[in-house]
Image (cartoon, rainbow, N blue to C red):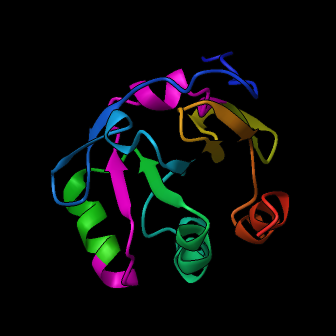
């Protein structure tokens, strides 16, 4: 289990992961850009679809404010490609099959559901500045309403 928590002001851990087209995307390649990295449990599930569609609906607002949006899940690139196509998404979804990036960001750990405890992906979002420093780290967010809350917190 991960007890890692990224605090505001921390340098975001570097990563390079394959996107839905199996193209390697690195955090370093986005240096100089503000980045929103959100972690979600599984593509094409109701909550994750809602969250991805909310990011898509607000993508123009985020890009106009200088943000790139990246979604990260344990899904294989082929599943992500189908999800991107099915939902007409215009941002990269990254595959972290071994959960290594989830763990370095503290987005994997103990969850509770109906009184049962288990390890899993913690729906989390991180806002990074142009230097890759964490401006905002949100853990255990709800899929519904999360993007609207994020826009308010960022003054967008």
Q: Is residue 43 above or below residue 130?
A: below
Any part of residue 140 in sight: yes
Can you say whether 5 is above or below 25 in the image? Answer: above
The structure residue drawn at horizontal position 48% and vertical position 58%, both measured from the top left corner, is: 68
Quadrant housing the N terminus: top right
Left or right of 60? Residue 127 is right
Task: Identify the image quadrant of the C terminus.
Answer: bottom right
The answer to if 96 sits in the magenta stretch is: yes
Residue 134 position in % (x across, y down): 66, 33
Q: Nearer the viewer, residue 105 or 2?
A: 105
Q: Position of residue 64 (x, y in %)?
A: 57, 73
Q: Can you give x and y, in whole percent of width and height, for residue 36 in the image?
A: 57, 51
Q: Which residues are magenta?
A: 85-109
The answer to whether residue 144 shows anywhere in this view is: no
Residue 111 % position (x, y): 70, 36
Q: Is 104 included in the stretch rendered in magenta? A: yes
């Amino acid at each position: 289990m991960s007890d890692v928590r990224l605090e505001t002001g921390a340098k975001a851990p570097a990563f390079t992961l394959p996107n839905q087209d199996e193209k390697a995307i690195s955090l370093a390649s986005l240096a100089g850009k503000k980045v929103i990295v959100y972690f979600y449990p599984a593509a094409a599930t109701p909550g994750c679809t809602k969250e991805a569609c909310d990011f898509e609906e607000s993508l123009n607002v985020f890009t106009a404010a200088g943000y790139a949006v990246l979604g990260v899940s344990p899904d294989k690139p082929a599943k992500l490609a189908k999800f991107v196509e099915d939902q007409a998404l215009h941002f990269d979804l990254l595959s972290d099959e071994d959960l290594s990036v989830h763990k370095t960001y503290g987005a994997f750990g103990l969850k509770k559901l109906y009184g049962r405890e288990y390890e899993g992906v913690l729906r989390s979002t991180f806002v990074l500045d142009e230097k890759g420093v964490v401006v905002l780290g949100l853990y255990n967010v709800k899929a519904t309403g999360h993007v609207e809350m994020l826009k308010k917190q960022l003054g967008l």
